[in-house]
Image: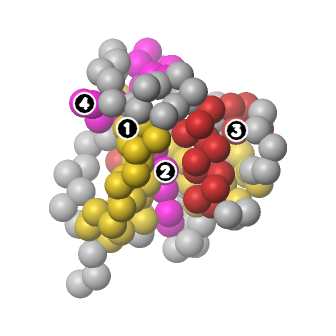
C-alpha cells in the first residue's frame, strides 16, 4: 500500500487520543499527490478530509486491511507501525514543531529510500516538509 502520515519533530502522531495538529494545505497537497485515487482512512480522520472538495474517500475502522499494493491510506494512529511491512510508498508530512505526544511512529525507515523532499507554507504552520520514501527493492 501507499501510506501518508503527519509527524512532529519527535515522530509523534497523537496525544491523549487526539491528533497533534492539522493543516488545510497539507491536505490539499495530499489531494494533488493522490490525483483522484481513493484515500482509505479512519472515521476519525474522515471529517477533516471531507470538508475539502476533490477527495474520493473510503472510511472504515479497518481501512488498512486487505489493501492492494497501490491503494492509498492515511494514518493518524499508531496503526501505521502494524502495517509498515506492507507499505511500498510512504509520504511523511513533518510539522517542523514539537508537540506533546504519547503515540509515535516507530520504524527506522531502513527499508526505504528517500525519493523526494518538498517544503511549503502551511495554513497554520510556517513550514511543512513532505518526504516521499519508497521501499528498497531486494
Mark 2: which secondary structure?
A: strand
Verify whether residue 13 appears in magenta.
yes
The vertical placement of 1 against 107, above or below, is below
Q: Quick check: is 135 in the magenta stretch?
A: no
Q: Is residue 73 visible?
A: yes
**How far from the left and from the top, in percent, is residue 24?**
62, 32
Q: CA distance from mark 1 to mark 3?
A: 18 Å
Q: Residue furthest bottom?
A: 138
Which label was assigned to residue 4? 2
User: How far apart in space, not on screen, are marks 4 and 1 (Cα)?
Assistant: 10 Å
The answer to which of marks 4 and 3 sits earlier in the sequence is 4
**CB of mark 2 within 8 Å of CB of mark 4?**
no
Q: Are marks 4 and 3 in contact (CB under 8 Å)?
A: no
Asked if 66 appears above or below 62 in the picture, the reply is below
Q: Are marks 1 and 3 in contact (CB under 8 Å)?
A: no
Which residue is denoted by mark 4 in the rendering? Answer: 10
Along the line of sight, the residue nearer the viewer: 78 or 46: 46
Tell whether 10 sits left or right of 22.
left
**Of the image marks 2 and 1, the number of the one nearer the N terminus:** 2
For label 4, count other residues whose C-alpha is less than 10 Å away and answer few (under 14), some (14-19) or many (20+): some
Give the spatial CA distance, label 4 vs label 3.
25 Å
Q: Are marks 4 and 1 in contact (CB under 8 Å)?
A: no
Marks 4, 1: nearer the viewer: 1
Numbered label tally: 4
Q: Residues within 10 Å of mark 2 (few under 14, many from 20)?
A: many
- Per the model, the C-alpha gap separating discs 2 and 1 is 11 Å
Q: Which residue is mark 3?
A: 49
* Residue that label 1 marks: 94
Q: Which residues are magenta?
A: 1-21
For the residues bearing labels 2 and 1, Cβ distance under 8 angstroms: no
Residue 104 at least partly seen: no
Amino acid at each position: 500500500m501507499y501510506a501518508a502520515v503527519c509527524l512532529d519533530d519527535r515522530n509523534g502522531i497523537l496525544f491523549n487520543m487526539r491528533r497533534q495538529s492539522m493543516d488545510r494545505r497539507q491536505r490539499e497537497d495530499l489531494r494533488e499527490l493522490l490525483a483522484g485515487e481513493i484515500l482509505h482512512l479512519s472515521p476519525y480522520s474522515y471529517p477533516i478530509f471531507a470538508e475539502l472538495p476533490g477527495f474520493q474517500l473510503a472510511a472504515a475502522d479497518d481501512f488498512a486491511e486487505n489493501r492492494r499494493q497501490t491503494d492509498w491510506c492515511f494514518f493518524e494512529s499508531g496503526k501505521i507501525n502494524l502495517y509498515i511491512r506492507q507499505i511500498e510508498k510512504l509520504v511523511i508530512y513533518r510539522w517542523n514543531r514539537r508537540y506533546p505526544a504519547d503515540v509515535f511512529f516507530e520504524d527506522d525507515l531502513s527499508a526505504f529510500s528517500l525519493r523526494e523532499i518538498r517544503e511549503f507554507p502551511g495554513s497554520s504552520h510556517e513550514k511543512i516538509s513532505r518526504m516521499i520514501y519508497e521501499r528498497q527493492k531486494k
